[in-house]
Amino acid sequence: MKQKNRTIKINTIPTDGSGSLSFFEANRDIPFEIKRIYFISNVPEGKKRGFHAHKTLKQLLFCPYGEIIISLDNGNDKQDILLNDPSIGILIDEPLWREMHWLKESSALCVAASDYYDPNDYIRDYNEYLNYINLEGVK
Ligand code: T46
């Protein structure tokens, strides 16, 4: 099944010739309570991270600075989204296999997440992921 559009607009306002300010609010702009924020930086250019899916975690991914490609795979269809604009976020609200490809070392990937860190929520093997979504009927 082809994937839906997962990008959302993050409120971004220009601040009088001195840049811009972006913001979002839990339960208003994104459909979950935020329990954790994390961000990834200093990743060498060309490097890929991710290679996992989450069972239940909901996330908003955004890139306030730089260029990162986020690849999302639902087991049937793969979608590549370029994050290079602080006013664009990617909402992930179902188990999707993801890979993140750093196009510029200075890029920062930020994540607002619906839950605390739980290593048991990760699926880090692609075949296990395919079995999981087939069993759960989440495709
Ligand atoms: C995701 C993508 C977009 C913690 O101890 N606490 C945390 O809150 C997180 C997020 C990670 N960690 C530990 C677990 C690993 O030992 O940090 C280490 C690196 O994590 P990982 O290899 O999962 O990093 P990425 O960049 O592949 O994935 C991360 C997030 O883990 C994941 O939730 O969706 O960013």
Image (cartoon, rainbow, N blue to C red):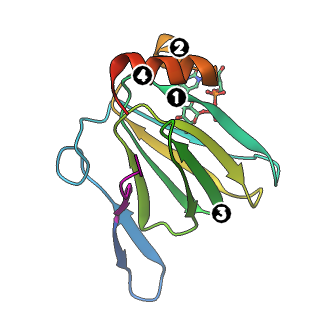
Q: Is mark 2 within 8 Å of ligand 1?
A: yes
Per the rendering, the mark at residue 91 is none
Q: Which residue is mark 1?
A: 53
**Disc 2 residue type (three-letter):** Pro
* Label 2 to label 4: alpha-carbon separation: 21 Å
Instruction: Write down the quadrant of residue 81 in the picture.
Output: bottom right
Q: Is residue 79 left or right of residue 26?
A: right
Which residue position holds label 4?
134
Magenta region's main secondary structure? loop
- Which of the marked residues, 4 or 1, is nearer the chain's N terminus? 1
Q: Nearer the viewer, mark 1 or mark 2?
A: 1
Q: Which residue is mark 2?
A: 119
Question: Which element is circle 1 on?
Answer: strand
Q: Residue at image x 24%, y 51%?
A: 25
| Three-letter amino acid code at the position of disc 1 | Ala
**Location of residue 85 in the rendering, given as x and y in whole percent from the top left corner:** 52, 69
Residue 96 position, x and y percent, is 47, 36
Mark 2 secondary-structure assignment = helix
Q: Nearer the viewer, residue 10 or 20?
A: 10
Looking at the image, in which quadrant does ligand 1 appear? top right
Q: Nearer the viewer, mark 4 or mark 1?
A: 4
| Nearer the camera: disc 1 or disc 3 | 1
Kind of residue indicated by mark 3: Glu
Q: Position of residue 99 (x, y in %)?
A: 63, 42
User: Which residues are drawn in magenta?
Assistant: 1-10
Measure how far apart labels 3 and 2 are at the Cα level: 27 Å
Give the mark nearer the N terminus: 2 vs 4.
Answer: 2
Q: Nearer the viewer, mark 4 or mark 3?
A: 4
Q: Amino acid at mark 4?
A: Asn
Which of 74/17 is in front? Answer: 74
Residue 121 lies in the magenta-colored region: no
Q: Which residue is mark 3?
A: 67
